[in-house]
Each structure stands twice: as C-alpha cells, then as structure tokens.
Image: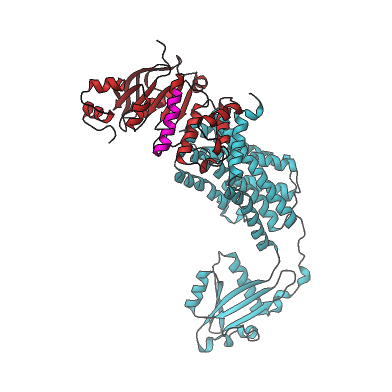
Amino acid sequence: MNNIFNHQLYRLVVAHIKEIIREPAVLFWGIGFPILMAWGLGIAFTTKKEMSREIAVIHSTGSDSIQNSVLSNILEHYPGKQKGDYYLPLINEKMGNVNLTFHECSIQDAHILLKRGTISLIVEVRNRKLYYYFDPANSEAQLLYQLVKGVVYNGPGYYSAHQDEIKPLTVSGTRYIDFLIPGLLAMGIMMSSSWGISYTLIDRRSKKLLRRMVATPMKRSNLLIALISARSCMNFVEALLLFLFAWLYFGIHIQGSIPALFLLFFAGNIAFAGISVLISSHTSNPEIGNGLINAVVTPMMVVSGIFFSYQHFPEWTIPFIRNLPLTMLADAARSVFNEGAGIMQIWKEALFLAMTGFVTFILGLRIFKWY
Amino acid sequence: MDYIVEVSGVKKSFKEVHAVKGVDLCITPGEFVGLLGPNGAGKTTLVEMIEGLQLPDEGVIRIAGQTWKSNQRELHKLIGLSLQETKFMDRLTVFETIQLFASFYDLDTNRVNEVIELVELQEKRKAYVNNLSGGQRQRLAMGIALLNKPLILLLDEPTTGLDPHARRGIWTLLKNLKEEKKTSLILTTHYMDEAEFLCDRIIIMDQGNILADNTLSNLLLKYNGARNLDELFINMTGRHLYD
C-alpha cells in the first residue's frame, strides 16, 4: 500500500504530533505558560496604577533629627501608621499616583532594607543637610532620587503641577505589551524548537530508539524532517493561541504585512530547528543535553531584548546582540507588529535566519550520531 | 551451499582496542545460532557489523550474498532486530508503534494486526507503550522485529530482566518461528538455558576471537566433563562465561 497515509514521512509526523499533544506538561509549558507570562507582564507594565515607593531616613540624634531638617516642612503633616514613618501621597492623574513612605531607621536597618530590595534610596540628615545614597546605575533609584529631591525643595504639589503639559501617547504599538508579545512569540519558537527537537533527539538516542529506527529501511532524513515539521506545526498553534489571547485581552494588532510575519515565522523555525539539530548531534546523555540546550538558549533569552530593550547593554555589545538569531527574529517581528513592516523590510532578516538554519542543520548532520 | 550470513576474515578495532580479530562464520537459512561470550568478547561489535551499523576494518560480510555497501536499503528489509531495552515512544499506542515501523517497510494495517496477534498483544492494542509491563514491551519489540518477516533475526538479550513466565512466552514465539524454517536467528544471551533451548549451534567468543562453533552436543562431547555452557567455557579458558 503506497498511499500517502502509510508513507513513512506522514506516519513519523503523525507519531511526533501525537507524542506532543498527549503530554499534558508539554501543552502547559508550550501554550499555557507563555499566555500566563504575557498576561502577568502585560498587567504589570501596561495597567496604570498607584505606585508605592519606600525610602529610609537615617540621622543622628539631636540636631540632626528630621524635625531639624528641610524634610520636616514636608513630612510633619504626613505621619504614617507606624511611629517614625511618614506617608506622603503624590497625586498626578496622567502619570498615576505615587505613594512615598519614609522610614526613620538606623543605617544598619537601612542596609538590610536595601539588600532585601524594599528600598532603593537612603536619605541621611546630617548637619541639617540631606545626603542621598543610591546606586547610580539603578535607573529606578535615580528617578526616585529626582522625585524626592523635587518634592523636598518644591513641596508635594511639585508632582502634580503642570499636568496639562503631559500628553499621553495613544500611538498604536507603543505599549509595553506591544513590545513584549512579538518577543514572546520569537522566544516561544526558540524554546519550543530547542527542547522539542534537541531534547527529543538526545532522549531517543539515549533510549536506543534512533539506533532501532536506523536499522530499518527508514530514510534518516525523514525522521528529522518529521520531527522538525511536527514541532513547527506545534509552534504555529502555540504562537496563534498567544496572539489570539493578546489580541482579545490587550487589543494587540498586526500593523504590518501578515505574509511577512508568516515568512519570519517560517525562517525562525528553520533557524532554531537547524540550531537544535546541531546541539543534539552528538551526545546521548540527557543531562549533558540539558546543559548544552541551556548554554545556547539562556544567553539569547537574557540579552536578546525579549522582556526589555537590549539598548541598556554596553554599546560595544549591541552589534553582536543584534545579530543573534533570537534578537533578529524578535526585532523583525516587532517591526511587522508595531511599525507596519512588510516583506521588503524584513527579507534580509528572514534570509539570514533561514541561512543560519541550513548551515547549522548541515553541520549537525555531518557529525550526527544515530546510535 | 548458500549461506544467509557469511562473515570472512572480519576485523574491527576502536583506537587501541581490537574488538574483533579476524572472525569467520556462516549461517544457513533457518538456522538458529547462539552467540555467547563474556563482556568485551566482541559479540556486540560482530552483531553490529552483521546488522550494517559498523563497517569492518578488514574482511567481508555478506547478507543473502550482498554486502552492505550500496545495498543498505535492500538489506535492512531482510533483517529484524530487537535490542536489549529499546524504549519506544511513550505516548504512542501498541498499534500506532507497530504501524509506524510498518510504514518503514511499506506494510499495511493487515500486517500490523497479524503481528499484534502473533505477539499476543491484542488486549493492549490501544494501550500506551509506557503503560506496558516489561514482558509486554519485549513482546512489542519482538513483534516489530518480525514485522517484515525477516530472513535474519538479530536478538540482543531478548529476555534479560523478564520474569520466567514472560521469558517462556518469548521462547515459545521463537520456537514457533524456528519450526517455520524461514528465518535465521543470531541470539546473544546471558542465559545458558535459553541458548540450549533455542539454538542449533553455539558460537563462543572471547577477546575478539571465536573459541568454539558447533552444536551444543558436539561441544559438550569435545570438552569432556562439561555439563553446561558455563562449564564448557571454564574448560576452555579457565574462566566463567559470565563473570
């Protein structure tokens, strides 16, 4: 019987898809988890809400107390719930309210709060003057310093003044969630391919299943093509569900060309499938495989600007980061989602990703151990 | 005489280790041969060369008159194989697993059903592989090995780790196969009673060489006083067969 439904490639694809969809954990990590992550991060960074910040105030006794400093003019009217605390609400309808809580405490307690991440700014009252201690590399602490200093010298009204100057942006594609979703789609392709292809191959090698299969007339290429095809199908379903969620819940839109997005999706799958075959080409030890997969995906996940822009990294690293497959896929996907890019704008990235996939696939095949 | 397997002057080394040091053997159609020897004797390397997984450094291996070079696809169709502890895809059913392997040989569902009956897994037809017992898994492996009605069946310790009942089931299956006289068997095993029960000929290997190749009764006769294969090996080498 030579019909398509009994062809070994068809049977291999079906077998791999069944293996994936019959594993509840795979469904959760592949579909449920990215949606939960998008929901959590989207809520955290998109919804306007009241922000609370805590500041430690340290001083010597006597003349260096808060009451003898410039702070007293501000804080004496805002006692907190606990003794030694001052609670200062700052109102701004456009930017969102900020609630500042000043804790009077010792330097030792302030350091503990700093280490726990409760505070990022310490104010010291010394000789009636204020000194600010914070990590200058911490942008959050810098902004808090600017805010507290402004409030101290200009009063609480400083934060709510000149609200008419602020014009909230309503340009589509500028929210955090608009930045996040294309990155999550790209990361989903990488993670799903790396674990779904690399780990599966290593696991099957360790269980001697690859050896058993190559002792039949099965074409070896069919096994890899089937595994990659099944994984790509699943990647498509995962990406579609994540997009549907983002569209329904956050109102995300694709401003650019949908065929361009498909092209990128296809190229991204080729790239990470090739990389995955290369990763899994030699080892039959799943623990080593774990390490290899993590060694490849974790750095890309950290530096490729999936959650936050990679522009914060040192300038000399940026050209390198931009050329990583994950960065390239995420950036190109963002340009389609948020900047209205079409095929002409992303073809170079798609070509580079596809070439990366072919080269790594061929390299992987050359050293591939079937048993 | 036409041999289904001809191995002549075969050598194989891995770096400094000479795994097989010039082996000759022939197997006739329908013959059941037991390949015995301690760990490191060269059994697995020899079987892998017969199976086409390894190429010999020297010598020739012919399967049904053909060498592996440029005849791989045809020769794979003649061979059935069951490895020790092969694990199939956990979340496929028995039927789906056999159907997958059947597709490699262009075999249809009728043959899949025949094999399920042959290895008596009808009741487990829809069970996932990871829900099978050790004996059922081995019967599944045996079924897959027999899917293509092989001329040569290579079994690597097919009953290791099975309970006596499950072992007996596999033996019965192989005994029935033997009666059909269509399939030759190369069996590596650690169980002497298994080799004694199933095999027409016993080949004993040690340190990459064949020490003995004869029927069990002739071997026991030749090495006076040996009551079983282990004693035979002790008489030959002064060591136990399976230390």
Query: Is residue A225 positioned above or below B202 on the image?
Result: below
Q: Quadrant of the N terminus of chain B?
A: top left
> Which residue shows up at 56% across the image and 25% down it?
B105
Residue B33 visible, this angle: yes
Residue nearest the viewer, comparing B220 with B19: B220
Tell which residue pokes out farthest to the bottom in this image: A62
Where is residue A116? Give x, y as percent.
51, 70
Q: In the rendered structure, does residue B158 fall within the stretch colored magenta?
A: yes
Residue A282 visible, this angle: no
Residue nearest the viewer, comparing A30 with B190: B190
**Chain ID, cyan in image:** A
Q: What colour scheme governs how the chains and residues are painted in the rendered image of this protein? A: by chain
The quarter of the displayed image where residue B6 is located:
top left
Where is residue A253? Give x, y as percent.
75, 51
Q: In the rendered structure, does residue B23 fall within the stretch colored magenta?
A: no
**Chain ID, red in image:** B
Left or right for A246, reference A352:
right
Left or right for B198, reference B145:
left
Residue nearest the viewer, comparing A27 with A84: A27
Q: How many marks?
A: 0
Where is residue A152? Give x, y as percent.
64, 79
Where is residue A252? Give x, y as percent.
74, 53
> Which residue shows up at 62% across the image and 85% down it?
A79
Segment colored magenta: B156-177
Q: Main secondary structure of the magenta part?
A: helix
> Which residue shows up at 58% across the image and 35% down it?
B96
Q: Quadrant of the C terminus of chain B?
A: top left
Left or right for A180, reference B68:
right
Tell which residue pokes out farthest to the right in this image: A164
